[in-house]
Structure formats: structure tokens, C-alpha cells
Image (spheres, grey):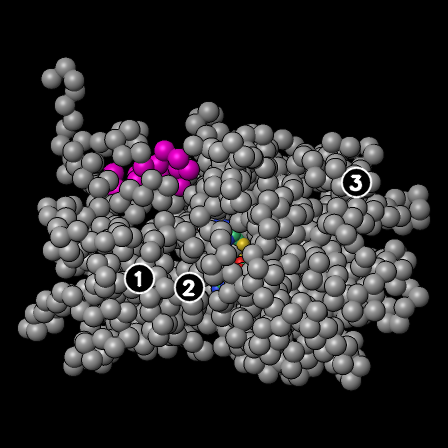
Amino acid sequence: MQQANAYQTKTTCPYCGVGCGVTATVEAGSLSAVEGDREHPANYGRLCVKGSALHETLGEQGRLTRPRVDGVEASWEDALTATAGRLNALRQEHGNHCVAAYLSGQLLTEDYYVANKLFKGFLGTPHLDTNSRLCMASAVAGYKRAFGADAVPCNYEDLEEAELVVLVGSNLAWNHPVLYQRLKVAKEHNPLMRVVVIDPRVTDSCEIADLYLGIEPGSDAYLFNGLLAWMAQRNKLDTRYLERHTEGVDEALVAARQSAGSIAEVAAACDIDPERLETFYYWFASQLHVVTLYSQGVNQSSSGTDKCNAIINCHLAGGKIGLPGAGPFSITGQPNAMGGREVGGLANQLAAHMDYHTPGALDLVSRFWATDSLTPCLPDGPGYKAVELFEAIERGEVKALWVMATNPAISLPDAARVRAALEKCPLVIVSECAAHTDLLPYADIVLPASGWSEKDGTVTNSERRISRQRGMLPPPGEARHDWWIICEVAKRLGFAEAFDYSHPWEIFDEHARLSGFENSTASGGTKRLFDISGLIGLGREDYDALAPIQWPVTVATPHGSARLFEDGQFATANGRAKLLAIDPRGPEQALSETYPLRLNTGRIRDQWHTMTRTARSPRLMNHRTEPFMDVHPDDALEAGVSDQALAVLTAAKGEFRARVRVSNAQRRGDVFVPIHWTDCFTRQARSSALIDSITDPLSGQPEAKHGAVALAPFATEWQATLLVADGAAGATPWRASAYWARIPMHGCQRWQLADTQPVEDWLVRFGEWLPAPVALWSEDPASGRLRAAGVENGKLRWWLMVGPPAELPGLAWLEARFNDEALNDTHRRRLLAGCDDGAVDSGPVVCSCHQVGQKTIANAIRQGDTSIEALGARLACGTQCGSCIPELKSLIEEERPHARAKQSPAD
Ligand SMILES: Nc1nc2c(c(=O)[nH]1)N[C@H]1C(S)=C(S)[C@@H](COP(=O)(O)OP(=O)(O)OC[C@H]3O[C@@H](n4cnc5c(=O)[nH]c(N)nc54)[C@H](O)[C@@H]3O)O[C@H]1N2
Ligand SMILES: Nc1nc2c(c(=O)[nH]1)N[C@H]1C(S)=C(S)[C@@H](COP(=O)(O)OP(=O)(O)OC[C@H]3O[C@@H](n4cnc5c(=O)[nH]c(N)nc54)[C@H](O)[C@@H]3O)O[C@H]1N2
Ligand code: SF4
Ligand SMILES: [Mo]
């Protein structure tokens, strides 16, 4: 029951770019519940499973709470002085350009703004880039080439109003689940609406697809060039729109025809069925209201920018833009990737959507920041993009790096090389919330940052909507807000006046003023599209009360702007949008005899990136517990690996050990691995270690979707599962096993282990490190099976099973025993079995919201509940966030043949 002193605050979800509004309940000093904000236009009350578990990821445990300098805890004063002192010393010796920053789309706009201002404006270095380089850089470059500005023309309602929605390289069902739910509902309401999915993998997003095109990885530009040529051939171009509002169509058509002559040729280049391809072309060409929603399957490519423009070309050519229900829609990944782009967080940007080459921009920004009287003043050209930045560190040219809210040791390609560069870098400063990450060991100075629910500021979502994240709880220990940390360092560097803010609202106000500063043709400059001057002068109260609003927000558009380019006027010098001549290229990472398989990398439904937050909620770990690889059945057969066995992927520079999932969703020759596992959670399964640092020449975005690997069995002598009570084990010698994965649960940690060496004596191997003496033991030397448990003072302290994980009982029963105050006799007797007498194992969790397992669901289907509604009514699965519905559907498909007819009440 809600306590009398409980209160609710509206804030924004810190995960994906949908940017859902969250209503959080705070009681007794902690955040007790979250629900979707019914008034927020991004989600109207919905939340996905990650959003609805937000309150389970908080708390002081596992957080960084004190600054550290050279591995030793320090006061803030000492840490700030050391940061400023060391940065200054390096600059004095090696020049301004030896210092760099690497930021993140998970910072708030205000944090981002002051970091950009400090590095570019006051430290005089252009080397400030962001993890958005790995995420949105190609989308940004594509929009700029076509429209003259990095501006998403569409909004979420357009998705609902479209007659055709094309998902290209986007697994919306898992990665933007609330938007997916909105699309699904819209489709139910409009049976004429069609959805096409273009992805080499059959994903859960195919659940609502009328047409699926399982293209050869990297072949998107052939497909869209083919579409443009086909439209021209069938007189489906909007010649009036092209003439009035665009340029470059002739060149674009010549290039399109060259690369994609006939349907048969395009189908061959994309390795898909020509009839399906032509169906797609026909649907696209014959509808005006088409939204093409694209994401990392397009961006993370060595030709990502060209892929984006190949898509945009088709929208311009058909006049399918600037209208309700139409447009090329790049969906953003991170909660504030857009805010970062707005302040100028990419190394090729200056500030407020101005680039170094924007006429007059350097002068304008330097006058606005009053850096014109300073030496050094603004750098006069772009800095290193992420991959180049780490190469410059490797060369010894960049000597100081401040990383905020991202983990380059995991997420940048060629992870081993990145780690070597970090090792070598004389000064690494890391601002971070989590106490354990793969990056922290490389840090000379560690600065503990406040996190979601503690910090205050704004974020911009995929549809240009600015929303407030609101602080409700005090940061743990001595953690401080990122903007505060940056400003305190700036003050110690001698820039007190320019960084004298007392609250984020003052920073936001300055950001709004810069966006409107000399932003008109009247003042002699060019009109910049990014303009939020309508939000100048909010003051603290109005800032705190700010309702979600879409930029541009100006005097003319005080309530924001739902859609851009409705008048056909673009942000280019002549006002025309540009079609680009695209020459399609395949992936650069080449397959070979040694590395014959194409490696695809991406996300899973319930985890967020390096899992520093989502893994804190045990129910989010249940959907996929261990690192895995999805492999086509024929590839599995050829490599001699089987479903659920351990296997190893090898690339030129790295290795990946994980469990195999044999899956028909994969194309033959393609392997998919998740990006989430780090050295904190497993022995060796970092996807980026398998990817070369090859980038798009225009955007600098890495080709993270197209590695080249070899697959082989991972021959192990034994496999085991060890559960250890939380806070019990000091040393964890089992980390020396050739394979281990740690899975946080309630009250205990689960370790999946395997090794290549036989174990003579289990007690000798692990016994002395286990936190309690053996209480129960059962062994079958012939089969190598063993089960044992340790009990101390009546409490279960550890549980061990040697044998394949397929033999595990459902672990919910054991998890509950770790939380028993004292084991009762019955439970104690059942410990080795790991379940109640006659209990049924519910299998791996499918529905995370209601924790319903696969076996339970399969059982219900067999008993006649063969629809989503029937399953929901019986088990509640699929009734909250809906993310598991595609999986429920496949289970229904699989189990239906075994279902018995359900008796109607009349029988
Ligand atoms: N659950 C969850 N949601 C997230 C995140 C998360 O970590 N977890 N991260 C957020 C972030 S930062 C981002 S950027 C977004 C990313 O969102 P998405 O882009 O949807 O995510 P990915 O899984 O990386 O990749 C999308 C799809 O691209 C496909 N693909 C691979 N190669 C190609 C190709 O050559 N062509 C085409 N057409 N498709 C291809 C993959 O098979 C995959 O299904 O997700 C956001 N949402
Ligand atoms: N192979 C491969 N690599 C990829 C991708 C891929 O698909 N395949 N995707 C790429 C993409 S799209 C992205 S976005 C990146 C994501 O990769 P990263 O950005 O490296 O991953 P995160 O886990 O989100 O890192 C955020 C870190 O910031 C911390 N943090 C959270 N909130 C705050 C805060 O308020 N302040 C501070 N100071 N710290 C905070 C978190 O604890 C965490 O350690 O990965 C990229 N790398
Ligand atoms: S869809 Fe994205 S923003 Fe919305 S609740 Fe889920 S993770 Fe958060
Ligand atoms: Mo991303």
C-alpha cells in the first residue's frame, strides 16, 4: 500500500530513444514503483519490460560512491584538483590538442553542453566525440547530405498514420518496444496498413510483417537503388515534387540504373526472391503515406551513409516526405543521442547544429561563449572521430582522455586494440555510476557520477521531443552530477566565469540562447533549423515544469513542431533537398576460407548495452541468461556444434565463447551474437573483439554488423552450475575455468562453468573457497555427475551441480531457498533435487513481466490454450508490456500440433 508520505514525479526513461514518460513513486526515500506516464506523447502510459523494471535497478549496492585517484580513494577536492592539474600539465607540455573527451548519448543535454563548451570552447581542442559515432553518425551524415541539416522529419504519429511501414535493419519489437506496440495497435485499427521487414535475420518484429525480405547482409543500397530505378521505369516518380523541391535526381537515377538494372539483378544482389522484391517495390511506389524506419542494420556499415541516402532518395523521388504518415525516419538508439547531436557532441560538429565549415559559425560561437578574447580560442577544424581518436591515443598523440557515460573497452570495434591504447594513455579520466566495468581498471582518475532518478536535465527522443528527466533521490555516497563535475574542473582550469552555473536550468537556458543566437537570415547569417529560442528564459520553475515539446520551438512555433519540411523548403543553401548518386558497396570485412561466416551483432530484448543497470534486475536476466550465438542448422551441422552446446567463434583478432542456439531465423552462413556481455559477466564473449575497426568514410561509423568469423565446437571435459549466496564468496577461483558466465539472481549469483581440463576432486578444486562446509553430497563417478550443497547456520550458502545445464531443475525453487531465513527439513531434504517433490520445472522465462516460463506456456498450449488471449487469461503472460507476444506466437506454432481440442463449456 502506498504510504501517506509517498509522492509521484514525472520523468523520462533512461534507456532507448523512444523516450517514454515515466511516473515514479517515491516513498520512504526510495523509488518504489514506476508506471508509464499516461500524458506523455511518446508512450501514453505504456512501458516496456526494461522501463517497468527501472525501480529494481537502483540502490547503493554496486555503485561508485567515492572518487579515486591512482587507485586510491580521494576527496572531491583532491580528485578535481588532480584532474585539472594533470590536464593542464599535459596541455602545457604537448599543446591543447593532446586532450580529448569521449562522451555518450546517455548524458543529459546539460551535461553534454558544458562538456562541449569546456573542451572545444575553452581547452581549445576539437577532439571531443561521442558513442553516437557508433550509433547514429551515418544517419546524421545522410540527413545532412539530403536536407542540409541533421533533422528527423517525422514523428511517432506518422508511423501510425502510414499505409506502409518499412523496417530496415531495425528490430523494433525488441529495441523500441513501445513504438512497436503503437505500430501494432495502429495496424490492428487499420487492416489496410502493411508492414515490411528488411533484415537478414527473422526477428520478433516479423510478427506483424506482411512481407519479409531476408536480404544478404550489407545489400540494402542495391535494394533501394533498385526501387528508385523501378519507380522511374513505372512512372511512379513525383516529378512535380522533384522539380520544385529537390536537385540531383538525374544523377541519382543514372547511378541507380547502373547498379540495379532489373528486378532479377537486384534480387540476385540481395539474394532474395524476385517476386517478393517486386511486391515490395509495388507497395512502396503505389502508396504516398510510407514511413521507412531504419536503424543499426543500415547505420553500422562501411557504406552506412550511402544506405541512408539510398532510402531518402526514394522518399524524395516519390514526394513521400513532409506529410502525415510519410518520411524517412531514422530511429535513435540512446535516450539522448539527439540531445548530443543538438549541442554539437560529435567531433565534426561545433555547437548548436553548427559545423566548423558553416559560414560564420566559428566567429558566432566564439563571441557567444566569449572565448574570442582567450588564448586558446576555438579550434578551427573538426577533431578525431571515435575510432581515429583511439588510434591517436595509440600513436601517443592524444595523451589525456576523459570518458563519460560510455564504455569504449566494450563497445568500440577491435576491443583488444582499444584496451592497449587505454593502457598506454598517460591520463584516463572516467566519470561513471557503476562500481565495476571493464573500463574502470584503465582509469587514473575515477569520478563517481549520479544516475537516473538522481540527476536533473533534459533529453531529446527520436521524434525531436525534449523531455525532462527529474531527480528524485539523493545520489549515493559522494556521487555528483556530471554537469557539476565538468564545471568544477573548468573552474580549476581557470574558467570560473564561463562555468558558473548553480543548476541545470541555467545551462539549458544558455543552450536555448545559443540555438537562437543570430539565427536568422536577417542578421546576415543562415537560418539554422535547430532553434529552441522559444524556450529561453524559462527560469527554474518553468524548467522544472517543462512539458514534452518537439523542436524547433520559436516565437513563431511556441508549441513546437510536429513535422519538418511540410512546405518543401529544406535547410540547404538553395532550399532544395538533394538526391545523391549512390554506388552500392558490400561489407569491407571480407569473408575468407579461414573466416567463412558473416558475423552479425545486436541487441536482446531485456538487456541494455553493457548491462551495468539492467543486470541488476534478476528478472531481466531470465530471458537470455548466458552469452549465446544464433547459428543456422546447416552451419551448426558443418561445424559439428549442437543446440545448447558451447562453441567458439574466432576472428582475426579475437575470440568469443558462448552457448549455441541453432536457429532457422538465421540465414545460412550468418551468425548472430549479442553485444551485451562484458568481462564482468563472462569469460570471453565481447562482440566487439571480433569486429575490425573499419568505418564509413563519410560518417566514421564502424561496420559493427559485418564481421568475419569461424565457428568451432568448444570441447569441454565438464560443465557445472554453481549457485553462491550473495556477499558470501570472497575469491571466485572458478573464474579460471575456460568458460564461465555469472548470472545475478535474487540473493545469490549463478555461475555457469565449463572447462577443458578434468577435475580430479571437486572438493579440492572449489571446496576451500566455498563459503560453507558441504552439507549434502551425491556423486555418480561413472557418468561424471555430482550434486552438492553447503549449509551454514541453517542457511543455504551454495549449491553445485556438475552436468550439462539441460539437467538443471527450474532455479526459482533454489533461488527462494537462498532467501529462506532457515531451511526447513523438507526443503533441506529436497536440496539436491533442487525442487519440491513432484514439482514441474517451468523452463526458461519467456514473459519477463510475469515471469512465466517456456515449459509452463507449452503445457498450457497443449491443454488447448492456443491463442495469445487464452494464454494471457490463464497465465497472464503477454498481458503487460507485450514484448513476449512474438515468442508466445512461435511457441503456439510449435506446440499447436500437440494441443488437445479445448472443450467448450456446453460440452
Ligand atoms: N533491449 C534493448 N533495446 C535497445 C538497446 C539495447 O541495448 N537493448 N539499445 C538502444 C540503442 S543505443 C540502439 S542504437 C538501438 C538499436 O536498435 P536496432 O537497430 O533495432 O538494433 P540491432 O539489434 O543492433 O540491429 C537491428 C537489426 O539489424 C539487422 N541487420 C544486420 N545487418 C543488416 C544489414 O546489412 N541490413 C539490414 N537491413 N539489417 C541488418 C540485424 O539482424 C538486427 O536485427 O536499440 C536501442 N534499444
Ligand atoms: N559489435 C557492436 N558494437 C556496438 C554496437 C553493435 O550493435 N555491435 N552498437 C553500438 C551502439 S549503437 C552503442 S549506442 C554503443 C553502446 O555502448 P556503450 O555506450 O559503451 O554502453 P553502455 O553500457 O550504455 O555504457 C554506458 C556507461 O555509462 C554509465 N552511466 C549510465 N548513466 C550514467 C550517467 O548519468 N553518468 C555517467 N557518467 N555514467 C553513466 C553506465 O553504467 C555504463 O557503464 O555500443 C556500440 N557498439
Ligand atoms: S520503449 Fe524505450 S524508452 Fe520506452 S520504456 Fe522501453 S526502454 Fe524505456
Ligand atoms: Mo546506439
Residue 205: percent from left, percent from top: 42, 43
Q: Is residue 765 above or below residue 458?
A: below
Q: CA distance from mark 3 to mark 1?
A: 50 Å
Residue ID for mark 2: 677
- Hey, which residue is sitting farthest top in the picture? 906
Which quarter of the image is occupied by the N terminus? top left
The amino acid on which the numbered mark 2 sits, given as a three-letter code, is Trp
Task: Give the secondary structure at mark 3.
Answer: helix
Q: CA distance from mark 2 to mark 3?
A: 43 Å
Q: Is residue 79 left or right of residue 223?
A: right
Task: Give the secondary structure at mark 1.
Answer: strand
Residue 68: percent from left, percent from top: 60, 72
Residue ID for mark 3: 539
Q: Residue at x 73, y 34 (%)?
A: 560
Q: Nearer the viewer, mark 3 or mark 1?
A: 1
Q: Residue 97's image quarter? A: bottom right
Q: Residues within 10 Å of mark 1 (few under 14, many from 20)?
A: many
Residue 330: percent from left, percent from top: 59, 47
Residue ID for mark 1: 725
Q: Mark 1 or 2 closer to N-term?
A: 2
Report if the CB atoms under discs 3 and 1 are less than 8 Å apart: no
Where does the magenta region start and end?
877-893
Q: Residues within 10 Å of mark 2 (few under 14, many from 20)?
A: many
Report if the CB atoms under discs 1 and 2 are less than 8 Å apart: no
Most foreground residue, 290 or 646: 646
Report if the CB atoms under discs 2 and 3 are less than 8 Å apart: no
Q: Is residue 166 left or right of residue 152?
A: left
The amino acid on which the numbered mark 1 sits, given as a three-letter code, is Ala
Q: Nearer the viewer, mark 1 or mark 2?
A: 1
